[in-house]
Amino acid sequence: MTDLQALHDASHTMVMGVLNITEDSSSDGGLWLDPAKAAQHGRDMMAAGADIIDIGAESTRPGAKRVSEEDELARITGAVNALIPAGAVLSIDTTRASVAAAALDGGAQIINDVSGGTLDANLPHVIADHDCLYIVQHWRGWLAGSKGANPDQDTSVYEHGVLTDVHDELMRQVDGVLAAGVKPERIIIDPGLGFSKPSIEHNLPLLTGLETFRGTGYPVLIGQSRKRFISAMLTEAGAVGEDGPTMAQRDDVTAALSALSAEHGAWAVRVHDVAKSHAAVIAGNIWRQYLS
């Protein structure tokens, strides 16, 4: 049985590997829809150094469509059943209470809710009824990062500055899940890089302001992997060819940000290329140790 108190500890940054069982995720959609391939990819990420495998069956990229509850359940439970016997620590990327409950009953230890408790009001109650960790992400609406359901609503405007507004809004979300009965020692927060934050100017203040989020007392997950602002950074620096940034370039920058996040005390980094970020996080953890 996983020691949840130890898993909640942020003194040593971990690597969370992304397992997208989706048709349309922005960088790896369709690659792992086959259950056997999904299970093998999960095991490969564990071998490459992933401390946690984050399984998602519904893309949250701008423009993505929702999958049915039945399809999400089937994809998630299949992967959980395949990876628990391999000794995996599993995080489930879902906004549905029914999917979370099934995965937790199957042995998953973490629920990663990109809506931060706002899309399905029953989900925080499922968390409260199970002994698991709950990642609460900053959220401004379904498919955040685009214009959302209302085409006239721009969710990327931050009246008091992105760092202040994201912090304050995220803490209100945390208050909501606490009111539902979730224990504070089971909560992890995520500033939601890329969600309602399309530009470099939206995301870098959150990364450089990681101490602000750590100051809440909650561990902090950073999900920078392959986000659009990384491509924008490379493009702005003139480091790309005619076809734009390559996947390898995006993963290199992701790894650099993983090292910096580890040095600044992130609980974990959520990444697609585990091997690159595993090495980077080792360096960041050692750097942090020598600074303390």
Image (cartoon, rainbow, N blue to C red):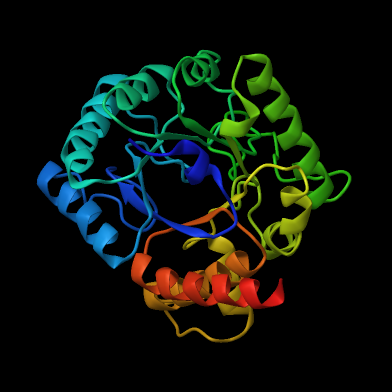
Query: Dividing the image into 4 quarters, which one contains the N terminus?
Result: top left
Residue closest to the eye, 199 or 268 = 268
Instruction: Please provide percent x and percent y for residue 177.
Output: 63, 22
Please, which residue is most extreme toward the right here? 160
Measuring from the top left, give residue 247's x and y in whole percent.
38, 72
Residue at the spot 59% in from the left edge and 86% down from the top edge? 238
Q: Is residue 68 visible?
A: no
Residue 236 lies, with reference to residue 266, above or below; the image says: below
| 64 is higher (above) or lower (below) than 125 | below
Q: Is residue 136 left or right of residue 88?
A: right
Q: Residue furthest left?
A: 36
Locate residue 237: give its quadrant.
Answer: bottom right
Judge left or right: residue 253 versus residue 220: left
Position in image of residue 31 (x %, y %):
22, 54
Residue 123 drawn above or below residue 240? above
Q: Position of residue 212 (x, y in %)?
A: 78, 52
Query: Which residue sits at x=62%, y=72%?
Result: 289
Q: Is residue 164 above or below residue 134?
A: below
Q: Residue at x 75, y 28 (%)?
A: 172
Q: Quadrant of the C terminus?
A: bottom right
Residue visible at 68% across and 59% down in the picture: 203
Tell me if residue 18 can be seen: yes
Residue 237 located left or right of residue 79: right
Left or right of residue 113: residue 154: right
Quarter of the view holding residue 233: bottom right
The foreground one among 221 and 94 is 221
